[in-house]
Image (cartoon, rainbow, N blue to C red):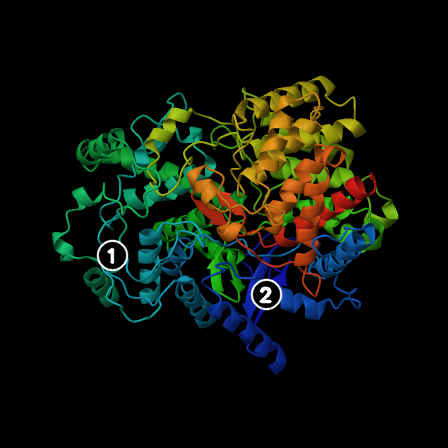
């Protein structure tokens, strides 16, 4: 039986940590773990998921919740409450709902202070791992569960018609051919029999674009992206950069794995013509229409053809091959730097497995490769739907910072002091305390001392909104008694966090995620992914900009003289950016959540934190009108992931409300003073949240609410608890109390 282990390095000689593995969450199989009743409960959860996998794609993330409920038994819960349609929502009802929710959620907290959870969703991640390492037989069985359980029908397909199997790039978004092929190959490599699939279009094994490692030698003055002709890799979005880095090494080394009988069989199964007759030059520019989200323009066809037909022959022979050898050495320097400064976790799952493969190609017996292996498990998550590879090594800091703000909003913090104290310790232990070593410009890195990461300190990559949310959380906690939440964060560490936030503001006033925006929007013309949008540079967005405003405003209230002019100027420019990017209809596009409700929450909250109000700010008035226009007839809000893809607000099927969208809209409207104008939308929304609460105090898992790159969705399983609690907390404190 599987069990989750937290903050555990396992005494592995190839593991090291900056903070004793705080935040680490890994699954371990123990054949002797669990009683027969507990095992039966797990199997029942799996069976229930299988029966309902069509209407509800994401899992309810039940395995760890079952485990923690056993390990952290809570006091008897309060009785469940339902509110009738015309019944008044009273403070007593809301308070009881909050206590029930907090009683449940506090038992889900790990001993190191964070809340574990599923950060899966993208189905193209796990296949990269399956061809890279040998995992235990238990891991392999769980890997097979995901493709089977996520398919819409029995696995048998002819690619020309897509009649049978439908697998999205994520559990909701659509990129079926890409993920179908990857999942099919994974199942075959893991020993499943062939099903007679046929491949019509898509990138082939020799039909990839030229990944010139030499281009990593280009100077920063060149503006374009490193897979183009005149490039500087330093200008790219770090996620894009860190994927192309190892890909260029693998391409430059012309690495090919062993041609086994399974590989030969797959060649016969996947292609509609004999493998040796495939025209790879033609295949390079083909993509199944179901996968094509970002069609590449003619300039890309010319660029890739030029690289392949002109540059490659030069670099393949003397003296050009000497330049390639130098470039390969430079690339591996950067690969090792990334590995060492993330404790071999790497920035994300794609470059994790590619960096590991590069280390193996360089030397199969190297220390670097051995250091990679134990960190594979940081990315693997197991739930009732099987094992998935997460989009990060978790969302630990992000979720915990939000959870703290949600709990404090209820004004019940003193009752949950132990929960807040543990969360406080986790956030303090997760701050990045040093910059990466060496010349940061040479390594294309931004400062990180004082930042908070998305997941763990061992991961270490600094992010603007994670730093802002971490700072907001510790500042709120510093206002509570020491007896309740413990010692506050050291003042100098607060100053370091402010320094990171200030350093990440772009000239236009906006904030991107990891770094400053280093290039121009037109560079997206050479986005080669076809399946994703906005990947080449790190774009400023409403969420990161708003979070920075909120954090700096909170900081300024407690430390009004520290860098006062810089902070005030930063807030002013950031607020102007948010106003400038608002759509004419009053909406903001959410880059990291679904979608306009998420963007609206951040947009309104950022402008209000900057000192604006509903009465003096037309942008806030337009934003409120926009949100109110999307309220469902039954009350609440429910937004589909299709909003992200199509950039047009789209309701969920059958106009169903969603707790998380409803909570985001409530939080935005409450901040904008909706209670003083017309509280009825808030009352209707509160009724939706109260009535959705489950018998044990949990809230139900609904559609995925995380998103990235326009066309991918990703799971934040903690959102179903955090945001209903947060919205009802604000509703109790600022709507019911004020009335």
Q: Quick check: can you spot residue 403? A: no
Q: Nearer the viewer, residue 172 or 201?
A: 172
Residue 349 seen in this snapshot? yes
Vertical order, 724 against 432 (above or below): below
Element type at mark 2: helix
Q: Position of residue 399 (x, y in %)?
A: 64, 48
Q: Circle 1: is it few (<14), some (14-19), or many (20+) Cα within 10 Å?
A: many
Q: Is residue 14 left or right of residue 65?
A: left
Where's the C terminus, which quadrant?
top right
Labels 1 and 2 touching (C-beta < 8 A): no
Q: Is residue 206 above or below residue 315?
A: below
Give percent across and percent down for residue 40: 58, 79
Q: Residue at x 44, y 31 (%)?
A: 537
**What residue would you read off at disc 1?**
159
Residue 191 numbered tag: none
Q: Report x, y in % for residue 166.
A: 35, 58
* Residue position marked by numbered label 2 in the rendering: 62
Tell me the residue at 71%/42% (across/down): 680
> Which of the two residues, 234 or 652, is positioned nearer the viewer here?
652
Image depth: mark 1 or mark 2 in front: 1
Q: How many numbered discs?
A: 2
Residue 459 is situated, as x and y percent measured from the top left of the image, at 56, 46
Residue 362 as seen in the image, left or right of residue 101: left
Q: Could you say whether the residue bearing mark 1 is in a helix, strand or loop? A: loop
Q: Residue furthest front?
A: 86
Label 1 and label 2: CA atoms lie apart by: 35 Å
Looking at the image, residue 310 lies above or below residue 351 = above
Q: Is residue 370 above or below residue 49?
A: above
- The foreground one among 661 and 422 is 661
Comes first in the chain, label 1 or label 2: 2
Residue 111 appears left or right of 288: right
Quadrant (top left, top right, bottom left, bottom right) of the N terminus:
bottom right
């Amino acid at each position: 039986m599987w069990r989750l282990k937290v903050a555990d390095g396992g005494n592995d000689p190839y593991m090291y940590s900056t903070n004793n593995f705080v935040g680490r969450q890994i699954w371990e199989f123990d054949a002797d773990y669990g009683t027969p009743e507990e095992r039966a409960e797990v199997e029942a959860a799996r069976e229930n998921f299988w029966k309902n996998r069509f209407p509800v794609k994401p899992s309810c993330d039940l395995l760890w919740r079952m485990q923690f409920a056993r390990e952290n038994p809570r006091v008897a819960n309060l009785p469940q409450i339902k509110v009738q349609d015309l019944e008044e929502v009273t403070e007593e009802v809301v308070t009881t709902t909050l206590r029930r929710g907090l009683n449940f959620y506090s038992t889900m907290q790990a001993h190191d202070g964070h809340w574990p959870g599923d950060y899966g969703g993208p189905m193209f991640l796990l296949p990269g791992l399956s061809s890279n390492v040998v995992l235990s037989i238990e891991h392999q069985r769980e890997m097979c569960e995901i493709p089977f359980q996520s398919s819409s029908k029995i696995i048998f397909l002819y690619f020309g018609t897509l009649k049978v199997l439908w697998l999205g790039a994520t559990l909701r978004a659509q990129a079926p051919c890409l993920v179908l092929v990857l999942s099919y190959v994974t199942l075959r490599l893991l020993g499943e029999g062939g099903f007679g699939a046929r491949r019509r279009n898509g990138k082939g094994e020799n039909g990839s674009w030229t990944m010139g490692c030499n281009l990593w030698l280009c100077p920063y003055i060149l503006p374009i992206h490193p897979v183009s002709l005149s490039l500087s890799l330093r200008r790219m979005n770090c996620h894009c950069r860190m994927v192309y880095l190892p890909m260029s090494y693998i391409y430059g080394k012309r690495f090919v794995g062993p041609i086994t009988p399974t590989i030969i069989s797959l060649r016969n199964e996947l292609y509609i013509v004999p493998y040796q007759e495939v025209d790879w030059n033609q295949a390079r520019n083909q993509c199944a229409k179901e996968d094509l989200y970002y069609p590449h323009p003619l300039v890309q066809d010319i660029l890739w053809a030029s690289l392949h037909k002109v540059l490659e022959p030069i670099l393949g022979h003397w003296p050009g091959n000497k330049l390639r050898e130098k470039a390969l050495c430079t690339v591996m320097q950067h690969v090792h730097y990334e590995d060492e400064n993330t404790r071999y976790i790497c920035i994300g799952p794609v470059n994790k497995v590619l960096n590991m493969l590069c280390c193996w190609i360089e030397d199969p017996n190297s220390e670097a490769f051995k250091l990679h292996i134990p960190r594979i498990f940081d990315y693997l998550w197991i739930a009732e739907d099987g094992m998935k590879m997460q989009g990060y090594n978790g969302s630990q800091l992000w979720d915990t910072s939000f959870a703290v703000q949600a709990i404090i909003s209820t004004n019940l913090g003193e009752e949950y002091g132990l929960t807040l104290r543990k969360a406080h310790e986790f956030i303090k232990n997760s701050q990045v305390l040093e910059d990466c070593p060496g010349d940061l410009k040479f390594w294309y890195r931004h400062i990180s001392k004082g930042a908070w990461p998305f997941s763990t300190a061992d991961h270490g990559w600094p992010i603007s909104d994670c730093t802002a949310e971490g700072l907001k959380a510790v500042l709120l906690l510093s206002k509570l008694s020491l007896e309740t939440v413990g010692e506050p964060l050291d003042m100098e560490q607060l100053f370091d966090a402010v320094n990171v936030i200030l350093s990440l503001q772009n000239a236009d006033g906006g904030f991107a995620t990891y770094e400053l925006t280093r290039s121009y929007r037109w560079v997206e013309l050479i986005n080669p992914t076809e399946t994703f949008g906005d990947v080449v540079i790190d774009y400023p967005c409403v969420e990161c900009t708003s979070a920075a405003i909120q954090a700096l405003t909170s900081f300024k209230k407690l430390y009004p003289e520290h860098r006062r002019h810089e902070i005030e100027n930063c807030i002013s420019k950031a607020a102007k950016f948010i106003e400038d990017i608002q759509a004419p209809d009053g909406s903001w596009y959410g880059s990291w959540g679904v979608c306009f409700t998420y963007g609206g929450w951040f947009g309104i909250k950022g402008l209000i934190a900057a000192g604006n109000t509903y009465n003096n700010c037309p942008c806030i008035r337009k934003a409120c009108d926009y949100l109110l226009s999307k309220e469902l007839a039954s009350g609440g809000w429910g937004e589909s992931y299709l909003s992200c893809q199509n950039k047009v607000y789209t309701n969920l099927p059958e106009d169903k409300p969603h707790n998380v969208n409803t909570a985001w809209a409530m939080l935005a409207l409450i901040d904008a003073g909706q209670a003083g104008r017309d509280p009825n939308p808030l009352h209707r929304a509160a009724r939706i949240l109260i009535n959705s609460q489950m018998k044990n105090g949990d809230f139900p898992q609904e559609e995925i609410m995380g998103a990235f790159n326009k066309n991918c969705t990703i799971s934040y399983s903690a959102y179903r608890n955090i945001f209903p609690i947060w919205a009802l907390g604000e509703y109790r404190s600022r709507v019911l109390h004020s009335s």
